[in-house]
Amino acid sequence: MSHHEISAQGTGFFTKDSQSNGTSQHSTDTGGLLIGYRYHFNRWLAAEANYGYDRNTQQNLTSGNSFNLQTNVHQATSALVATLPSNSRVNPYVLAGAGALVFDPTGNAGQSVPGAIRQAKAAFVYGGGADFRVADHFALRAEYRGFVYNRPDFELASLPTGILAHTAQPSAGFVFKF
């Protein structure tokens, strides 16, 4: 059994719209990248650390104003992974953990708001997927990860705070086991 693995995946990044106190918030759907390392303690239990990157636009509509704020979204998470019973070719798993999503305004013209600052939000991550073995040390991975966190307000007075957000992140990529 290989105890170590690294992975690279292409992702989707889809955040559910929210409304609160007269403000509607929408994030554009986008794609990104997820890089990970997983260590297997035994055939059933592993721990993983991941870094991800996406760019989207936070679209906000308040009672007297509307504005867009383009952000680079960095994610750093860790999780415990439970491998489910499997056959020699398909290895399903579930995961749960925590981390942070960092929303960093790009400052691009027409997509920025004066005074908006970078903001990190704690996130609960959950999900599952399957590795499809291609060779002894190589597999293809299909995965779903969900994030639950407080939507960023960028310390702008016009945005409400404490709004719970959910982002879905389906992905596919490859795994190298060593």
Image (spheres, helix red, strand yellow):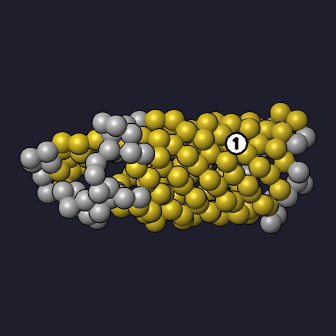
Q: Where does the N terminus fall, quadrant-wise?
A: bottom right
- Local crowd size for mark 1, using a 10 Å CA cut-off: few (<14), some (14–19), many (≥20): many
Q: List x then y, in percent, for residue 176.
A: 82, 44
The front one of 126 and 169 is: 169
When the figure is inspected, residue 72 is found, relative to residue 117, above or below; the finding is above
Q: List x then y, in percent, for residue 164.
A: 32, 59
* Residue, disc 1: 8
Q: Is residue 156 left or right of residue 16?
A: left
Q: What residue is rendered at 55% in x and 39% in y?
A: 32
The front one of 91 and 69 is: 69
The front one of 175 and 129 is: 175
| Secondary structure found at label 1 | strand
Q: Is residue 21 left or right of residue 69?
A: left
Q: List x then y, in percent, for residue 121.
A: 43, 63
Q: Is residue 167 left or right of residue 76?
A: left
When the figure is inspected, residue 162 is found, relative to residue 14, above or below; the finding is below
Q: List x then y, in percent, for residue 117.
A: 36, 58
When the figure is inspected, residue 125 is found, relative to residue 15, above or below; the finding is below
Q: Quadrant of residue 153?
A: bottom left
| Res. 142 in view | no
| Res. 144 in view | yes
